Amino acid sequence: MKLNSNNLKWISTFFVLSGILLTNLNIYPFNIILHATGVIGWSICGFLMKDKAILTNFGLQIPLFLIGFIYLSI
């Protein structure tokens, strides 16, 4: 299957929404892993589409997830 930007957007959306669901269900750390995967996918889409709003929204979430991964490893 060829992965185009439209497929990547839908897959990333699935991961973001799954991460939000797991956060609401207090299932940790899988919520961070799934949500971060979706955020990375959306950041790639924003870069490919040259969409600064998407890059701002999702790109700025990446450091927050890095903090979560660091906290997880402590």
Image (cartoon, grey):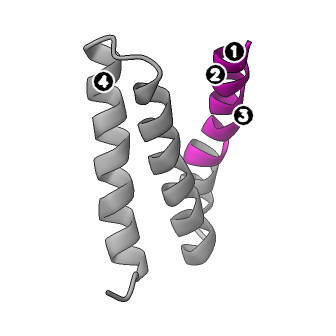
Q: Which disc is residue 7 wearing?
A: none
- Label 4 or label 2, whichever comes before in sequence order: 4
Name the residue that disc number 2 marks. 68
Please identify the residue farthest to the front as the structure is shown.
Answer: 73
Name the residue that disc number 1 marks. 71
Question: How many residues crowd mark 4 within 10 Å: few (<14), some (14–19), many (20+)?
Answer: some
Q: Which residues are magenta?
A: 58-74
Give the residue type that dot 3 points to: Pro
Give the residue type that dot 4 points to: Leu
Q: Quadrant of the N terminus?
A: bottom left
- Label 4 or label 3, whichever comes before in sequence order: 4
Name the residue that disc number 3 marks. 63
Q: What's the CA distance linking mark 3 and mark 2?
A: 9 Å
At x 33%, y 51%, the residue is 13
Q: Quadrant of residue 11?
A: bottom left
Question: How many residues crowd mark 1 within 10 Å: few (<14), some (14–19), many (20+)?
Answer: few
- Label 1 or label 4, whichever comes before in sequence order: 4
Query: Which one is in front, 49 or 20?
Result: 20
